Image: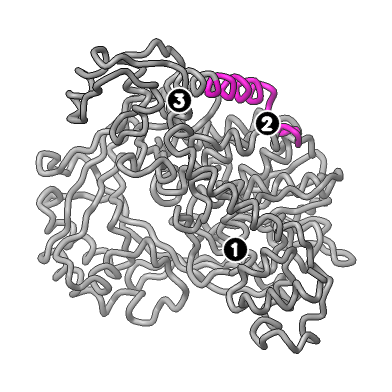
């Protein structure tokens, strides 16, 4: 056995798996250390991937040559494209996954990745020399050396689980916490704090009256996560189910608030505002008489269900009483209650855009250790950290993504520039260029960059080239193909839109609401391309003006991204800057003028001062 590696990744959650796979696929000798090899890529909360903005991140990971999209497609038991009633910038893919098969698929990928080794153990100490990380020591006393280390510790650093007054040390239910590393990093100057998240009760489906629930089926179409054409959904598809709480449920929950760790002072850490517990909902939204709940299957064949919308740390009996007040759950049996968990995280403003720490060279942080929440946010950070850890070992230019290139770029820039005051979750509203960052074009944005690194395969580049060629051909066809009125009018009348008086070019019809190229290709045109390619062409045609306008805006901002200011100023000595700007700029030491402009507390006037000093 070897104890010397290029890269060590600590933690095999979603960030760790993507980091390790990326580093190894790029050629680095990589060691992935995990507490439990049977829990690799464990879906600690909902066994689902994607959703609003998160689905875009998964497509970006796939376009970069990552694995989350592939695993999600292969283990999906339901697929839905969310927000289809809105514009394509808002469309977001989501799958419900088979929890156990998701782990199995990820483990199979990792075990068959060249240059990648796995060690089951817990890291308790890091080794440093001359301001650089040099290796790790584990609980079993094993010492491994490495040129780079990526920490993806999730919720395990000093993790503490709460169910009412019961407190259990752990990173997940029935899994031990990790101790020692936070204290070691604090001792050398790292800033850390505590966060809180939670997970709902797990329900035995045999005890549910499904006749009292509203069925929610998945989509049965061509959409998926991976751009690879040989990756398909293979499992039997299952429905999710919808129900609601009531005032009777809320009254029972209120009885337990004095015993809620969130309200009796037991939990002091920062909780997620965008994914509140059920007890937080009834307090914050006290005027609401009901809240929607989603009963979602945990796998293809299991009876276990996840109750989305009922996250809680209330005592077990209170949770059970409240559930039984929902008609469909009056005879409910549960596998385990919901719980809250507190854990350590590190201020992400201590990181470079590569996710390397500013304080220690070759040490990278990715995932919940940076104050984020969600498998997708973790995976996006993990692949960037893994790429840059490899570059640090073998040379090359740092790999970063701009805000107009990827949601992953927005995510990382937000973290390192603004920091976090609650668990960070991605939304489409966080991206100012979201019409450029659609789920359909992540391959066009990112695959060439990943191919140039050596991470994306030639197969991906061939598929991308074919897609571009066919999209261009379709757009040319739409601009030149004429439709006669007598041929198209029955179709238009069926859609309750005005008939034509004379023939027009096909592109003129596509400007009408509710008319899309995919449907027309089935009805009246000779197009026989893949539906995903037709959809991509349709979006580019319909939103051409918006896309061009947003690209111009991005190009203007990117001129400021090209003005590098890192280490160029002693901000404390520039008296014409505001006091807050001097403090924030000194603390963050931004890479560019554009990043400086996004720091809270740095005003446009402060930016003007810096530009004047630069002679701009």
N-term-proximal mark, 3 vs 2: 2
Of the two numbered discs 1 and 3 in the rendering, the one whose residue sits closer to the viewer: 3
Picture quarter containing residue 526? top left
Image coords of residue 435 (percent x, y): 49, 45
- Badge 1 vs badge 2, beta-carbon distance below 8 Å: no
Task: Using a 10 Å C-alpha cutoff, classify the residue at mark 1 as few (fewer than 14 neighbours), some (14 to 19) or many (20 or more).
Answer: many
Relative to 72, residue 395 above or below: below
Chosen colour scheme: one colour
Q: Could you say whether the residue bearing mark 1 is in a helix, strand or loop?
A: helix
Q: Is residue 460 magenta?
A: yes
Task: Using a 10 Å C-alpha cutoff, classify the residue at mark 2 as few (fewer than 14 neighbours), some (14 to 19) or many (20 or more).
Answer: many
Disc marking residue 512: none
- Residue 104 visible to the viewer: no
Residue at left offset 53%, top offset 51%:
433
- Range of magenta residues: 451-472
Q: Is residue 223 magenta?
A: no
Image coords of residue 475 (percent x, y): 50, 24
Residue at left offset 79%, top offset 39%:
28
**Image check: 265 left or right of 64?**
left
Q: Which residue is mark 1?
A: 415
Q: Which residue is mark 3?
A: 532
Q: Which residue is mark 2?
A: 456
Image coords of residue 597 (percent x, y): 64, 69
Quadrant that contains the C terminus? bottom right
Instruction: Using the image as rendered, state which of residue 210 and residue 537 is in the foreground.
Output: 537
Quadrant that contains the N terminus? top right
């Amino acid at each position: 056995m070897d104890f010397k590696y290029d890269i060590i990744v600590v933690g095999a959650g979603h960030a760790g798996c993507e980091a390790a796979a990326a580093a190894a696929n790029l050629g680095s000798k990589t060691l992935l250390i995990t507490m439990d090899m049977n829990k690799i890529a464990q879906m600690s909360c909902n066994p689902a991937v994607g959703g609003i903005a998160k689905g875009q991140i998964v497509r970006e990971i796939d376009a970069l040559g990552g694995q989350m999209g592939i695993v999600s497609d292969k283990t999906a038991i339901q697929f839905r494209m969310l927000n289809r009633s809105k514009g394509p910038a808002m469309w977001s893919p989501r799958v419900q996954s088979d929890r156990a098969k998701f782990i199995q698929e990820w483990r199979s990928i990792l075990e068959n990745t060249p240059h990648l080794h796995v060690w089951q153990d817990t890291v308790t100490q890091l080794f440093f020399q001359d301001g650089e990380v040099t290796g790790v020591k584990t609980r079993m006393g094993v010492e491994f050396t490495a040129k780079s280390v990526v920490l993806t510790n999730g919720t395990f650093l000093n993790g503490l689980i709460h169910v009412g007054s019961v407190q259990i040390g752990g990173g997940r239910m029935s899994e031990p916490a990790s101790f020692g590393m936070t204290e070691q990093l604090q001792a050398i100057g790292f800033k850390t704090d505590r966060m809180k998240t939670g997970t709902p009760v797990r329900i035995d489906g045999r005890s549910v009256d499904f006749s009292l629930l509203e069925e929610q089926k998945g989509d049965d179409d061509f959409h998926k996560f991976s751009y690879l054409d040989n990756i398909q959904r293979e499992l039997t598809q299952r429905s999710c189910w919808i129900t609601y709480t009531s005032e009777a449920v809320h009254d029972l929950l209120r009885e337990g608030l004095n015993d809620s760790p969130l309200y009796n002072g037991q939990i002091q850490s920062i909780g997620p505002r965008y994914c509140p517990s059920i007890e937080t909902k009834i307090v914050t939204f006290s005027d609401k008489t009901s809240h929607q709940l989603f009963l979602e299957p945990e796998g293809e064949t299991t009876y276990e269900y996840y109750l989305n919308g009922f996250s809680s740390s209330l005592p077990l009996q209170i949770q059970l009483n409240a559930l039984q007040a929902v008609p469909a759950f009056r005879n409910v049996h549960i596998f385990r209650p919901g719980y809250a968990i507190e854990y350590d995280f590190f201020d992400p403003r201590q990181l470079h855009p590569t996710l390397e720490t500013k304080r220690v060279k070759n040490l990278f942080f990715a995932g919940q250790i940076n104050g984020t929440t969600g498998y997708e946010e973790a995976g996006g950070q993990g692949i960037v950290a893994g790429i840059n850890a490899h570059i640090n070992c073998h040379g090359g230019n740092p790999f970063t993504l701009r805000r107009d290139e990827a949601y992953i770029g927005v995510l990382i820039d937000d973290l390192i520039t603004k920091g976090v005051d609650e668990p960070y979750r991605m939304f489409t509203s966080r991206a100012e260029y979201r019409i450029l960052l659609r789920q359909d074009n992540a391959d066009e944005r990112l695959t060439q960059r990943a191919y140039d690194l050596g991470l994306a395969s030639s197969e991906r580049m061939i598929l991308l080239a074919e897609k571009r060629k066919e999209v261009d051909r379709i757009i040319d066809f739409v601009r030149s193909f004429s439709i006669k009125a007598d041929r198209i009018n029955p179709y238009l009348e069926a859609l309750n839109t005005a008939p034509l008086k004379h023939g027009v070019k096909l592109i003129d019809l596509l400007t009408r609401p509710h008319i899309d190229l995919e449907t027309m290709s089935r009805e009246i045109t000779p197009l026989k391309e893949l539906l995903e390619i037709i959809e991509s062409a349709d979006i580019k045609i319909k939103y051409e003006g918006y896309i061009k306008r947003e690209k111009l805006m991005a190009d203007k901002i990117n001129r400021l991204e090209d003005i590098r200011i890192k280490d160029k100023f002693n901000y404390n000595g520039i008296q014409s800057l505001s006091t807050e700007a001097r403090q924030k700029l000194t603390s963050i030491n931004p890479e560019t003028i554009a990043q400086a402009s996004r720091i809270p507390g740095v005003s446009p006037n402060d930016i003007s001062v810096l530009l004047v000093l630069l002679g701009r």
